[in-house]
Amino acid sequence: MEDISQPADEVYSPGDEVRVYLGPDDPDGEHHGKVGTVVDILEDSLAEETERNLDSYSYRVEVDGQELDIWFRHRDLVPER
């Protein structure tokens, strides 16, 4: 059975190393598997609708010295071990 990576149980912080984990049909799927560093965090009100606190967080990630031009939701990132 395949070990499926899970998002962290708490908010990521700038400097945390993460791996982008997207489904094959995701429009930003080209970034799946990239490893980088969290460089910025955005908090919105999505958790009010979903009742899942971590849904309110989105992150910018830097890969190989370049900041990706996309905000990733918390569920799209897994800790890089």
Image (cartoon, rainbow, N blue to C red):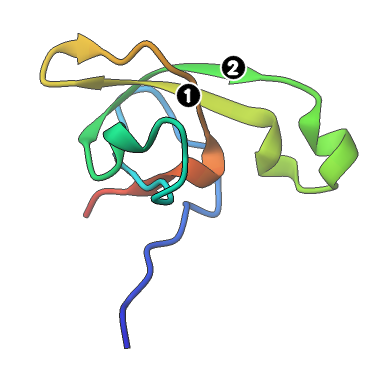
Above or below residue 51? Residue 55 is above
Callout 2–callout 1 Cβ contact below 8 Å: yes
Q: Position of residue 80 (x, y in %)?
A: 25, 49
The amino acid type of the residue labelled 1 equals: Tyr
Tag 2, which secondary structure? strand
Which image quadrant: the N terminus? bottom left
Tag 1, which secondary structure? strand
The answer to whether residue 41 is left or right of residue 69 is right
Which quadrant of the view contains residue 9?
A: bottom right
Q: Would residue 17 be seen by someone viewing this image from the given angle?
A: no
Which quadrant of the view contains residue 46?
A: top right
Which image quadrant: the C terminus? bottom left
Q: Residue at x 61, y 29 (%)?
A: 57
Give residue 42's mark: 2
Q: Position of residue 13 (x, y in %)?
A: 43, 29
Query: How much space separates mark 2 and mark 1, taking CA atoms?
Result: 6 Å
| Residue count near mark 1 (Cα–Cα under 10 Å), binned few <14, some 14–19, many ≥20 | many
| Residue count near mark 2 (Cα–Cα under 10 Å), binned few <14, some 14–19, many ≥20 | few
Q: Residue at x 49, y 20 (%)?
A: 71
Q: Residue at x 38, y 70 (%)?
A: 4
The answer to whether residue 48 is left or right of residue 18 is right
The residue under label 1 is 59
Above or below residue 19? Residue 72 is above
Which quadrant of the view contains residue 73?
A: top right
Q: Position of residue 39 (x, y in %)?
A: 35, 16
- First in sequence: mark 2 vs mark 1: 2
Q: Position of residue 47 (x, y in %)?
A: 80, 37
Asked whether 28 or 78 is in front, the reply is 28
